[in-house]
Amino acid sequence: MKKLTKKYSVQLAGLLLLLTLLPVSCIKDDYAAKEKATVQVTFTTRTLSDETIAGDDLAANERMQTLRVIVAKGSKILYNEYYTKDDFARYANGQRYKTVTFSELVTEDEEDRTFDFYAIANEVGTGYNDWENVSVQTLENREITQPFSSNSLIPQTAKKTITVQIPQDGGGIQEEKMQLEFVVAKVSLSFSNQTGEAQTLSDVKIVGAKPDKGFLFNDEDNETIYIPDGVKYSDVEWAREVITAGTEMEPTIFNYSPVYLFPGQNPSLDSGYKLTATLNTSDSRELKMPSITGLDRGQELKINIRLYKEAVDTQINLTWEVVDWQPSNNIVPPFN
């Protein structure tokens, strides 16, 4: 048997050491390429403009009652979690929120750190019941056709693409926030009767302002009114009502039930919304709102109509404004 010289012994030892280190290096590189991250996301409903207003001052059907959170990577769904209001916490103002921690989000490499987060509140209001097995493609393209009333749970949604930070700062948990938005707009209508006589209002409608469907999700920045193809428009209508007598000093104020509309902008309404009404079965009026040609999700059109006497004739004064969705209450601003 041939003996190795010292020179060759050293070379062999070095080679063995190199072979020993190579697998470890490969494993380490592979592990680094698929680092696991933890992301903690807090989901809230719309932020109320007045922080002193309790979250439950929203109408009961507008509050977040349930929440589904879906996390996807491309077309693959990684998480699909469901929560009820018993799982929610509250801020000091009563606003409901849910914080969810997603651990072991694996990032493949430096260019592949983004995950899509979807949130759906009050999913029963959408008319669909396939949420446990829904696909990403369905989420992205889902249309809602189910109409809403004051007794319907109003869905809220949000989508956000989150880029995972590697390495993660602080305690190793990346904190994010997602605020949900109503999938519809809202129209509130109030009448103030100052005529001293009971007034019957019928055929109250906004002509051609009601789309028949809308998307479940908007774009991430909510900057565009997304309208599905083939939308048809009809009239927004309210039931016949008798508004009891009131005076200038003590008007009778009547609040109709709110109407919920899918986002829309009817091309035929480029000159503005028109509200029509019939007083006491024979006196038809048309009131124009030239600055209003469409509504987006999360907006509220507040319409106030004042009926008053001028000489012997009943006159109508119309005021309106588009605002962010406001808490529900029975206080009507003064009619000026």
Image (tube, rainbow, N blue to C red):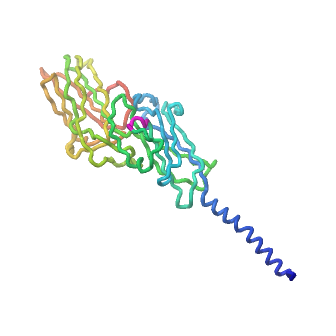
Residue 262 found in image quarter:
top left
Q: Is residue 122 left or right of residue 308?
A: right
Residue at 20%, 45% in the rendered image: 268
As drawn, the residue found furthest toward the front would be 1
Q: Is residue 265 left or right of residue 330?
A: left
Residue at 55%, 41% in the rendered image: 100
Indicate whether 150 appears above or below 23.
above
Task: State yes or no: residue 61 in magenta.
Answer: no
Residue 84 image offset from top left, x and y in percent: 50, 33
* Quadrant, the C terminus: top left
Indicate whether 12 appears above or below 241.
below
**What secondary structure is the magenta-colored segment mainly?**
helix
Query: How many labels sit on residues?
Result: 0
Residue 13 image offset from top left, x and y in percent: 80, 74
Start-end of magenta stretch: 122-127
Residue at 22%, 24% in the rendered image: 240
Is residue 284 or residue 191 the one in the foreground?
284
